[in-house]
Amino acid sequence: MKNEDAVSPVVGVMLMLVVTIIIAAVVSGFAGGLVDSTESAPSITMDVEIKNTGLFATSGFKATVLSVSEPIPTSDLRLTTRWTASDKSNTSETISRVAISDGSDNVFGWTAGRMLNVAAAPWGYGTGIEEVSTGNPNNVDQQFGNYALSSGTVMKVYPAGTKGGFGGSADTKGYGISTPYEYTDWVYSSGTLVDGMQAVLGEDWENLRTGDVVTVTLTHFPTGRNIFSKDVVVE
């Protein structure tokens, strides 16, 4: 009489199930580790104002931080603006622009005595910036890329302009000096003579009028995510 030992089919199925469960647990744990190791993007809420009155003294861009999940270094951020405006000299044409500020290639080149010769825009004021709240951006900590955004921080810029001239010159230069909505003796040239509004809104921003819409976006470099986006109506 011949005796042969064999594994029962039921036991074999159970062993396969156990192996499958173990593999699934390992894969699940690995995937969970990947999720946990991925940096989460910070959150932010802001109130943004854009004004174009045709004059340098009353036009500007202002973003007030209302809340943040944590302080956000502007060196980790890129500010992008997108807009389309009707050409006021020819209503059948439109002008569209995209401007990007990341603290590296958008600079303020106005060499007036009270301003930095080079100051990356938009400039920071208030919370977290040595309590600088007003005045010209003559503090290095106010340059975009050097300060962090916290609740109460304000980012703002304005167009270049003065009735007293630049660098002691008797000439008057800038935005809305002699003619509203036009630059006088001031030519857009990225990286050199770029004023605050040109740096943040791009060339031809002066064509924006009340009611036009500018989409303002903040992108967080480390996570690659947009942490803020808003359609802002020009005042």
Image (cartoon, grey):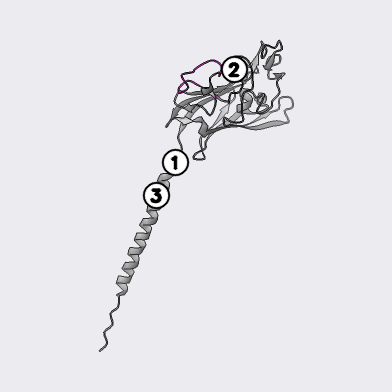
Q: Does the magenta stretch include residue 132?
A: yes
The part of the image, by quadrant, that contains residue 191 is: top right
From the image, give the main secondary structure of the stretch colored magenta.
Answer: loop
Above or below, 12 relative to 71 = below
Neighbourhood count class around disc 1 (C-alpha, 10 Å): few under 14, some 14–19, many 20 upward: few
Q: Position of residue 44 (x, y in %)?
A: 46, 31
User: Which residue type carries mark 3?
Assistant: Gly
Residue linked to disc 3 = 32
Q: In which quarter of the image is the C terminus?
A: top right
Q: Where is residue 147 in the image (x, y as percent from the top left)?
A: 50, 26
Residue linked to disc 1 = 39
Judge by depth and name the residue closer to the eye, 137 or 78: 137
Magenta highlight range: 123-136
Query: Which label sits on residue 103?
Result: none
The numbered mark, 1 or 2, whose residue comes first in the sequence reads: 1
Q: What element carries label 3?
A: helix
User: Which residue type carries mark 2?
Assistant: Met
- Residue at image position (66%, 14%) is 167
Is 139 left, or right, of 96 in this rendering?
left
Foreground: disc 2 or disc 3: 2
* Residue, far bottom: 1
Above or below, 213 relative to 179 = below
Residue 210 visible in the displayed image: no
Give me the C-alpha separation between circle 1 and circle 2: 38 Å
- Residue at image position (46%, 38%) is 41
Query: Which label sits on residue 115?
Result: 2
Is 38 left, or right, of 165 in this rendering?
left
